[in-house]
Image: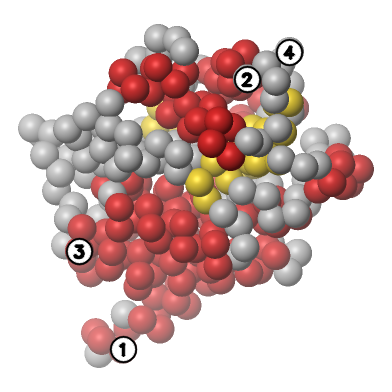
Amino acid sequence: MVVSDPQVEKAFRDKPERVIHFPETVLSRAQMDAYGAMSGLAIVEIAGRDSVAAAIEAVKTEGFTNLLPTYAYTGTEYGDWNTVPDAVRVLSGQLPDVRVHPLLVLGSPQFWQALNGRFSGVMKQRYGAFSPCVGCHLYLHSVRIPIATTLGHCPIIAGERELHGSRIKVNQIAQALNRYQELTEAFGIPLLFPLQHISSGDHIEKILGCVWDEGKAQLKCVLSGNYRDVRGGVVVNTEQVVGYLEDFALPLTRAVIHAYLQDEVPQHMKMASQLLEEIYEPQSR
């Protein structure tokens, strides 16, 4: 049975720099060695219902026998923390023949801030419109690369979908998803999107084997819907998304992950500032 650990709750509350150098009480060297020796291991991104459905679908198609559920904090979440271990319980209950390991909580709000917060004004000035949701999903995938590498380059399973009924989410358009995958694969980590081409919510519930309304029973984000106008229309276009990713977000993320893999905690903001000076300042002079 999966239970909520007070240390896990504390990590979510305090949101420390925790991408590498996990406390022994959270993830010991012996535990990492054991995970690295396991066959059929995959890391699961735990969020809402899509992430759980993605893990279930991946087990069916890829034959994973060990799943390590992970939650990555950003600094913008709010709501009932218990929805996270509850999602792990649903996952475990739907996969009785798969070993679902204890939830691991990780993250770096400073990394998130460097990608999406501090320089959002610069991004709007540069591209005309900007949404932190794109860089947020890039962060959520990439921040798991160091632990996936440590555990033997195991795959990461995520619940990304290109379509949600008739709605488009700019952080999950094909052009963004392809670039997320290219980034992780450059570090030798497969990023799996088992639900990428599923648009029906009913299909998701069929995979889950239970009723779970979209957006319910999960943590919320204070920035939700930021790329929509008052009538719900999308105000950020594909060209702006791709420009932000190619010019800034992907180069910064590659540099940050390289630093983590060298066992260094990056100076996220300094790296972002230097990159912006290199790519934008010469054009403004």
Q: Marks 3 and 4: in contact by CB < 8 Å?
A: no
Three-letter code for the amino acid on which mark 2 is drawn: Leu
Q: Which residue bears the numbered disc 1? A: 282
The spot of residue 135 in percent (x, y) is: 40, 54
Of 9 and 249, which appears nearest the observer?
A: 249
Asked whether, in this view, residue 97 is left or right of residue 113, the answer is: right
Q: Earlier in the sequence, mark 3 or mark 1?
A: 3
Callout 1 secondary element: helix
Task: Kindly identify which numbered label has been placed on residue 1.
Answer: 4
Q: Which tag is nearer the camera, tag 4 or tag 3?
A: 4
Image vertical order of residue 148 relative to residue 256, above or below: above
The crowding category of the residue bearing disc 2, from other C-alpha atoms within 10 Å (few below 14, some 14 to 19, many at least 20), is some
Three-letter code for the amino acid on which mark 3 is drawn: Glu
The spot of residue 22 in percent (x, y) is: 78, 45
Q: Which residue bears the numbered disc 2? A: 95
Q: Residue at x 46, y 63 (%)?
A: 182
Q: Earlier in the sequence, mark 4 or mark 3?
A: 4
Q: CA distance from mark 2 to mark 4?
A: 12 Å
Q: Which tag is nearer the camera, tag 1 or tag 2?
A: 2
